[in-house]
């Protein structure tokens, strides 16, 4: 059987979407490890769910991997120190224009590992979720949803497919791609461990076509493995944004449509980011929780793009300094990809677990919005098959009662409609406002 | 880098296509047929095209000035409307009639309903119909081409002595821009390659018309290649604002146009069916859109569960 026959094609093709320029400049660059900065500010809420309470106080000595924050809530993930050193303060700080509850640690530069860390032995099904919890793992694709919650599906749901999301459909970002290439062993071993312990029949590793090296690596690795043909399959997805969105990737991999407000487990799937799998496996083998993250440093104002492994809590300005600076006319820092990433107000914002890119963009001339010409491109681009132009028109007319009928709550804010609009109308932005308004109406 | 950063809501990148770029593509696609019309019908055709384009732009400029609106002539849509109207006129039409047509298209049909994107019928076609009913004698008398003269009234009235080849390449009388099917198709292919239009509407329009003609025993080649069918199907029926959004809607729209054109040409006494068919279907577009509304992704399952 040839390679092309062995790699699966998507079961269903994505609706709409946008063909973006990939800008995967850093795809072939080996990641560099950033030395610990003088001070890290580790936020106590880096996930969706209950924020953590600090477990340390001023002047405590912490090691790399020492647990410094925890919450009693189920939907939450513990926080670990990313450097060894002394706690300077615990409390609220202004970071990136936001008031953030964080632990400030002055690094001694030695990166001493916590002596109490030891490999985790997985004996039963529940241990996988426990490992994810102890690791402090959250959805590393950008959502930040605690992984152990995902791995403890309701009893009545029958999980038959584990989808490993390595689509990485946002431009510029290559950190998942580098994870596949550099730590392919962790990824594959992690997948087999999860599959056997969680008793999942089928695993689909989904990667976009524009990452041939990662596909090749995982393919060769998986071929050597025990039962590749039977249950663990590699699926090559078209490079079309937003292929990596949860609903879209489930549809592509299994043909199942995830209804509004339902979880992947309701359609028998667990979706995990490829870096999450690697991180979980490293925790199980070494005991080291999630304390550093591979970040793609790129953007129009960056002359030397690279992938950097950054301790969590490092201020962005330190990362920029380490990476070799940015050009004079830089005026926007995006955390995440250019389609869904958020802007930070100042460069003292810190790297969190769920971040996977820092993009520094040049000043660009703002394009004025012109009249909608009803070309229908936003409708064609919407992966949720909504009518962004009609929502915008309702918004402009103040017809907020129409939002429900126009299904704005289906919108996942992928940005495709704004991207394709030739009249440069702020469609996604209005969708966001409309969604918030609809939530308020429903209360 | 230090100091205030620019903060905006995602997405942070945009596709390079603009409204202006789309309009420029349409103009480029129309030019070969327009230039050919000028060569075929001589100086009068050049004058008429210049007059319709200039008066359309001027009308929009003055409208925006008087009403203190943001100037919109920069989006090139008035040029497209003017050019399309000019190409739909017989070269014998007096200049003042052409000016009236442009003013009707821009002021009455487009700007009075809110400008670009808000008109419910295609401005060029509406203006052509207004001229057709107001000045029928000017609009339906066709001059003979100055070059490669093949004398005839209009192919639809009397098609003796016309070969398919001369119809395809446009060596016959007719409106300035509608004679050469070849150049119009070329323009259409350019627009499809540039992804400005999809082939759905032209194919359904021409296809359904050809099929009906075939069934009724008419001369398919002559019927398809003559009159304003190519110009209408490729450039006017595909107007974004006045055509349906969804692919299924486009199919319904195209077939509707084809059927009405056939009915008018076959049973009616009007000189031209294409304009009326497009304008009638334009009016139905909101209903077609409503009919073909798609359900959001994953919506059906919700109902099944609840």
Image (cartoon, rainbow, N blue to C red):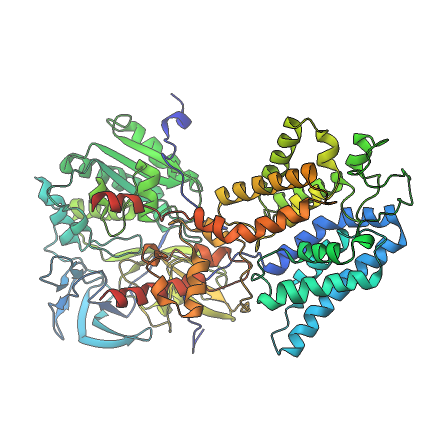
Question: In the displayed structure, does residue A173 sit left or right of residue B140?
Answer: left
Question: In the displayed structure, does residue A75 sit left or right of residue B194?
Answer: left
Q: Position of residue A45 (x, y in %)?
A: 21, 65
In the rendered view of the protein, which quadrant contains the N terminus of chain A?
Answer: top left
Q: Position of residue B51 (x, y in %)?
A: 80, 62
In the rendered view of the protein, which quadrant contains the C terminus of chain A?
Answer: bottom left
State the residue in front, A125 or A223: A125
In the image, residue A370 sits, relative to residue B249, either above or below, namely below
Q: Residue at the spot x=39%, y=67% of the render?
A: A399
Q: Is residue B234 in view?
A: yes
Q: Position of residue A230 (x, y in %)?
A: 26, 26
Q: Residue at the spot x=15%, y=57% of the render?
A: A75
Q: How many marks?
A: 0
Question: In the displayed structure, does residue A79 sit left or right of residue A40?
Answer: left
In the image, residue A433 sits, relative to residue B267, either above or below, namely below
State the residue in front, A219 or B31: B31
Q: Is residue A324 in view?
A: no
Say which quarter of the image contains residue A35. Answer: bottom left
In the image, residue A351 sits, relative to residue B42, either above or below, namely below
Q: Residue at the spot x=28%, y=53% of the render?
A: A140
Say which quarter of the image contains residue A349. Answer: bottom left
In the image, residue A104 sits, relative to residue A289, either above or below, namely below
Q: Position of residue B71 (x, y in %)?
A: 64, 72
Question: In the displayed structure, does residue A308 sit left or right of residue A68?
Answer: right
């Amino acid at each position: 059987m040839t390679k092309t026959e062995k790699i699966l094609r998507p079961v269903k093709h994505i609706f709409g979407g946008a063909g973006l320029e990939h800008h995967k400049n850093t795809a072939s660059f080996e990641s560099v490890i950033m030395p610990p900065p003088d001070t890290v500010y580790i936020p106590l809420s880096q996930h969706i769910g209950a924020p953590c309470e600090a477990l340390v106080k001023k002047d405590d000595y912490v090691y790399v991997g020492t647990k410094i924050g925890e919450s009693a809530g189920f939907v939450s993930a513990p926080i670990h120190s990313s450097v060894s050193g002394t706690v300077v303060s615990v409390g609220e700080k202004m970071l990136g224009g936001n008031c953030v509850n964080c632990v400030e640690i002055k690094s001694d530069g030695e990166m001493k590992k916590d002596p109490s860390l030891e490999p985790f032995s997985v004996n039963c099904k529940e241990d996988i979720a426990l490992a994810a919890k102890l690791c402090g793992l959250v959805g590393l694709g950008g959502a930040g949803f605690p992984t152990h919650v995902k791995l403890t599906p309701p009893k009545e749901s029958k999980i038959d497919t584990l989808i490993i999301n390595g689509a990485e459909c946002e431009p510029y970002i290559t950190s998942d791609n580098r994870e596949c290439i550099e730590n392919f062993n962790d990824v594959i071993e992690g997948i087999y461990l999860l599959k056997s312990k969680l008793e999942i029949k089928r695993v689909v590793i989904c990667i976009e076509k524009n990452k041939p090296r990662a596909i090749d690596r995982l393919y060769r690795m998986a071929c050597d493995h025990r039962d590749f043909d039977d249950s663990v399959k590699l699926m090559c997805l078209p490079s079309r944004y937003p292929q990596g969105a949860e609903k879209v990737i489930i549809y592509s991999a299994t043909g199942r449509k995830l209804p509004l407000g339902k979880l992947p487990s309701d359609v028998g799937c667990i979706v995990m980011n490829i870096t999450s799998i690697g991180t979980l496996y490293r925790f199980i083998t070494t005991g080291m929780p999630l304390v550093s993250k591979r970040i793609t440093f790129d953007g129009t104002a960056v002359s030397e793009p690279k992938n950097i492994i950054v301790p969590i809590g490092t201020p962005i300005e330190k990362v920029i300094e380490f990476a070799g600076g940015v050009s004079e006319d830089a005026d926007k820092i995006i955390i995440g990809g250019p389609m869904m990433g958020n802007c930070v107000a100042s460069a003292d914002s810190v790297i969190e677990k769920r971040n996977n890119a820092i993009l520094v963009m040049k000043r660009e001339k703002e394009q004025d919005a012109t009249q909608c010409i009803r070309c229908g491109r936003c409708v064609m681009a919407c992966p949720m098959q909504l009518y962004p132009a009609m929502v915008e028109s309702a918004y402009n007319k103040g017809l907020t009662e129409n939002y429900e009928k126009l299904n704005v709550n289906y919108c996942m804010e992928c940005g495709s409609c704004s991207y394709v609009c030739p009249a440069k109308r702020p469609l996604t932005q209005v969708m966001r406002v409309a969604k918030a308004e609809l939530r308020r109406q429903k209360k | 880098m230090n100091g205030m950063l620019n903060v905006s809501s995602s997405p942070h990148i945009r596709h390079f296509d603009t409204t202006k770029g789309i309009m420029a593509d349409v103009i480029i696609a129309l030019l070969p047929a327009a230039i050919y019309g000028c060569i075929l019908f001589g100086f009068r055709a050049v004058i008429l095209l210049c007059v319709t384009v200039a008066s359309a732009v001027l009308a929009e400029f003055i409208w925006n000035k008087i009403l203190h609106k943001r100037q919109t002539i920069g989006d090139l849509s008035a040029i497209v409307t003017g050019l399309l109207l000019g190409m739909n006129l017989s070269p014998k039409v007096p200049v003042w009639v052409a000016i009236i047509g442009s003013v009707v298209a821009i002021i009455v049909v487009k700007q009075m309903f809110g400008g670009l994107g808000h008109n419910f019928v295609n401005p060029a076609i509406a203006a052509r119909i207004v001229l057709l009913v107001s000045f029928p004698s000017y609009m339906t008398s066709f001059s003979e081409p100055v070059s490669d003269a093949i004398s005839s009234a209009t192919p639809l009235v009397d098609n003796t002595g016309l070969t398919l080849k001369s119809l395809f390449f446009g060596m016959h009388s007719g409106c300035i821009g509608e004679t050469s099917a070849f150049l119009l198709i070329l323009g259409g292919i350019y627009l499809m390659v540039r992804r400005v239009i999809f082939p759905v509407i032209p194919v359904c329009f021409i296809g359904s018309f050809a099929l009906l003609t075939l069934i009724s025993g008419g001369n398919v080649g002559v019927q398809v290649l003559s009159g304003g069918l190519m110009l209408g199907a490729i450039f006017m029926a595909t107007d974004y604002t006045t055509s349906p959004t969804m692919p299924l809607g486009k199919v319904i729209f195209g077939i509707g146009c084809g059927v009405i054109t056939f009915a008018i040409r076959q049973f009616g006494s009007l000189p031209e069916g294409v304009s009326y068919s497009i304008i009638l279907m334009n009016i139905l577009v909101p209903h077609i859109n409503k009919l073909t509304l798609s359900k959001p992704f994953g919506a059906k399952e919700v109902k099944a569960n609840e």
